[in-house]
Image (tube, rainbow, N blue to C red):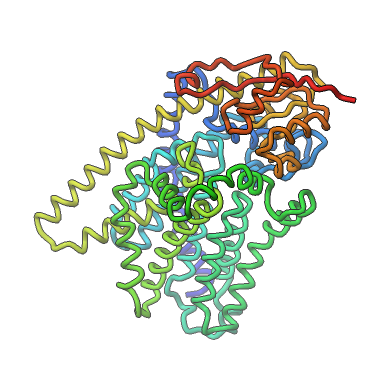
Amino acid sequence: MSSADKGTTIFHRFRRSDRKLLFWVIVAALLGGVYLLHAWVAHGLMGFPLDDAWIHQTYARNLSTLGRWVFQPGEVSAGSTAPLWSILLALGYRLGIPHMAWTYGLGVLALGVNAWLAAGLSGRLLPGRPFAAWLAGMACLAQWQLVWAAVSGMETLLFSGLGLGLIRLIADGEQPSEEEGKTCGELEEGVGQIPRLRYFLAGLVGGLLVLTRPEGLLLLGLVALCLVFRARHRLRRLAVVGGLFGTGVALPVLPYLAFHFAISGHPFPNTLYAKQQEYRVMLELYPLGQRWLTVVQAALVGGQVLLLPGFLFAIGHALFAVRGHTDASVRARRTVMFLLAGWWFAHLTLYAWQLPLTYQHGRYQMPVVAAFVTLGVVGSVMLCDALRPGRARRIMARTALAACAVIYLVFLGLGARAYAQDVGFIEGEMVVTAHWLAAHTPQDSLIAVHDIGAVGYFAGRRLIDLAGLITPEVIPIIDDETALLRFIESQGGSYVVFFPDWSPAYRRMAQDARLEAVFSSGYAWTRTQGRENMTVYRLRLNRP
């Protein structure tokens, strides 16, 4: 087949995919709309369920209006964990689109793309089984954590979609084709632009994955291992493929690393180091095995837990059932299974090892939920096929499908309620406090605050970040209230804002006689949960 014929075939394939993608995006928009509507009905407001979403909005707004990568005007910082997401948000500001509408739109688009990719990968793993592909896509769409993430204002689904897209590109590269058996010279000259573009695009997508979240390096490393393994006996081919893939990776990643080295002296955003420092006590209290089980448990809250047997069956099939096969299509399916399972396992293991946090519905585990669901659906279908044909198998399959549908619907409803509560919490605590600071503090005030998102976006004041994202100087003293107050005083801080019960250090800080409480959010729901409201303290220090 000529390069022109290949290009025509791929063009028609994309035309068909466009129609499918539109379907998935429309359904994603409907589900996201249900969550937004529920938040509006419950609280009469719309917002984001995480304060971190306002951090991205602040970077995006400043990038659009000031043309600089700053959280505070005049201070270039390395505090954004997801620069690619902030850049996409900045585009909305530049176009004059209301920031909430633009952000929600990007989120539901990402959810639809995740479902589309999940369906496509499932179709590759189970060729000739369109219903299985449809199930995988619907399972992703109906996964309550992913709908929550779609309207969270966060980069979660961009990261997940780029990861699935990278796996899809590698799967396409593993397809049997005329390039099997060609010499390297023919590969370099005759295979044409489409295969070359595929490996370059795979590298570029992998680089963008890292720009979305630094832990994208895990999947990038797994993909690199797959490419090396596949071409291990053809060194010239390995050089060509590796060069194309590496060039694609380097284009976004090298400037990313150079920027962070220049600003902070570290290769990655400050958030990475600040979070580890703040929660390092968890590494000392719990052994790795217990932390891993806790992290995995958080990733399985919902209907996806019913897919666990299928997920494990698919891994076993990839390990044992296809060993020794030389057929390229079988190798391609095995590669996809390993990448999906390996990414899920590596991602959760990294967090269990360094940052075993499961709060906010397992927000750090959400990026690999779609990968789990995709392989879980495929494995469940394969497991069903492995049973003896007959009436019993049909009954079991239909019962399992009905159980999944019911549990998914139940958790979709619970997720909508949780989303409304989360939005209400951020609006009732952080946003209300930010507006109070804007109205009741001098314009030149320097405010020390632990949660900088909404305060940074709405208050319009200079900030000291007690979590270390934009003020890395506090990272070594993040749990030492005496040193923190001394640092705030040395910088000329006037106010300190935090939840008094956030940590033992903050409990002690709240009792310090030098702090005078001048405002509390008073949000009732927080009190019903047995927690304290966000409080503003005036700092009464004697400065020389």
Is residue 69 shown above or below 384? Answer: above
Locate residue 414, reporting x and y percent: 36, 31
In the displayed orientation, state which residue is furthest to the left: 391
Q: Which x, y percent locates residue 398? A: 18, 48
Residue drawn at point x = 74 percent, y = 51 percent: 260
The image position of residue 530, as x and y in percent, is: 47, 23
Give the residue displayed 65% in from the left and 23% down from the top: 511
Q: Percent position (x, y) of residue 480? A: 68, 37
Q: Nearer the viewer, residue 242 or 98?
A: 242
Q: Is residue 535 left or right of residue 34?
A: right
Work out whether residue 488 can be spotted. yes
Furthest-right residue in this view: 544
Q: Residue at x 49, y 19 (%)?
A: 527
Q: Nearer the viewer, residue 188 or 339?
A: 339
* Quadrant showing the C terminus: top right
Rendered image quadrant of residue 200: bottom right
Nearer to us in this view, 427 or 336: 427
Q: How many marks?
A: 0
Residue 116 in view in this figure: no
Query: 476 or 302, which lies in front?
Result: 476
Q: Residue at x 50, y 76 (%)?
A: 229
Q: Determine the image quadrant of residue 386.
A: bottom left
